[in-house]
């Protein structure tokens, strides 16, 4: 397959999309669901692609076909421990790390009692998936967005499993076993940049987009953003939450 597209913004497949737009969505699904591997032309799910092209399934349906394929099973199930399988399912299908031990246990029990396909369907049929992605948006990383009921540790855990565009999910070890077991944050370790040296988050800056309630009888919300260095990120996020602000997005500044 040709190089997969980088998904920096949500990819949505609109009705009556062109073949070019269809291919962008298909490649985005392969990259997101399969964890950014090198995918051969022979590995493509041509029948499922045709169903998507003809409007017989939605993007959500295509995501399900890929997640239930022999290729996904070989990459994310057959060669890894069960905790890693669930960790990857959360990342690939919901765009976030597992929330806690209870969520892990729920998925372990479901797989044990109902099997592989029921486990995959539990993500795709969830209210969370429908709310975030609907039928026609390709799943993407949501762990850099503040959401109601989600603790701040989700940010650091998200960094632990979302290692950047150049990385893949071939690692066989679960990344969050200790953090979930102890309900603790994860130290953010920079991903390798290859032989040329190590990638370093500490020199980077991040833009935090905030929605904040304003004063007055109409109680409007105002939008603002600020840029902070990496070592100030956690402190600023906590400060925003204490002042009643809602973090809409945290993004690396180019």
Image: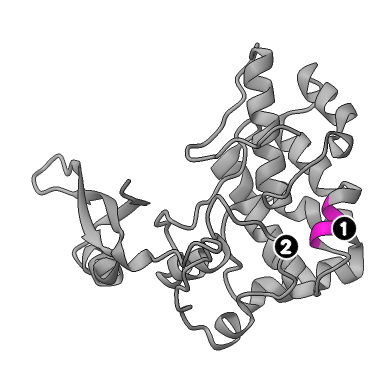
Q: Residue at x 47, y 66 (%)?
A: 197
What is the span of residues highlighted in magenta in the rendered image? 72-76
Q: Can the viewer see residue 249 in this picture?
A: no
| Residue 227 screen position, x and y as percent | 21, 54
| Residue 64 screen position, x and y as percent | 79, 43
| Residue 159 screen position, x and y as percent | 49, 65
Q: Residue at x 46, y 67 (%)?
A: 198
The answer to whether 248 appears left or right of 48 in the picture is left
Q: CA distance from mark 1 to mark 2?
A: 11 Å
Q: Is residue 74 magenta?
A: yes
Q: Can the viewer see residue 14 in this picture?
A: yes
Q: As rendered, which of 203 and 73 lies closer to the eye?
A: 203
The numbered disc on residue 170 is 2
Label 2 crowd bin: few (<14), some (14–19), many (20+), radius 10 Å? some
Q: As rendered, which of 190 and 138 lies closer to the eye?
A: 190
Give the vertical position of 245 relative to 254 (above or below): below
> Quarter of the image holding residue 245?
bottom left
Q: Residue at x 68, y 52 (%)?
A: 35
Which residue, given by chain and number where applicable, does mark 1 sit on?
A: 74
User: Residue at the front extreme?
Assistant: 196
| Residue 175 screen position, x and y as percent | 62, 75
């Amino acid at each position: 397959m040709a190089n997969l597209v980088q998904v920096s913004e949500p990819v949505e497949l609109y009705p009556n999309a062109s073949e070019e737009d269809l291919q962008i969505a298909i490649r985005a699904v392969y990259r997101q669901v399969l964890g950014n591997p090198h995918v051969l032309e022979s590995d493509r799910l041509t029948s499922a692609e045709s169903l998507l092209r003809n409007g017989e399934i939605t993007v959500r349906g295509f995501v399900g076909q890929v997640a239930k394929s022999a290729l996904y099973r070989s990459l994310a199930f057959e060669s890894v421990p069960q905790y890693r399988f669930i960790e990857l399912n959360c990342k690939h299908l919901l765009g976030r790390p597992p929330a806690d031990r209870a969520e892990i246990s729920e998925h372990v029990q479901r797989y044990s009692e109902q099997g592989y396909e029921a486990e995959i369907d539990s993500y795709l049929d969830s209210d969370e998936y429908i709310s975030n992605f609907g039928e026609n948006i390709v799943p993407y990383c949501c762990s850099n967005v503040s959401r109601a009921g989600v603790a701040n540790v989700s940010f650091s855990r998200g960094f632990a499993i979302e290692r950047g565009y150049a990385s893949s999910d071939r690692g066989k070890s679960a990344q969050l076993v200790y953090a979930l077991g102890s309900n603790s944050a994860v130290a953010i370790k920079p991903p390798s940049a290859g032989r040329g040296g190590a990638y370093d988050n500490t020199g980077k800056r991040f833009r935090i987009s905030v929605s904040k309630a304003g004063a007055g009888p109409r109680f409007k919300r105002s939008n603002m953003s600020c840029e902070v260095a990496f070592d100030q990120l956690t402190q600023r996020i906590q400060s925003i939450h204490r002042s009643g602000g809602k973090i809409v997005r945290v993004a690396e500044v180019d």
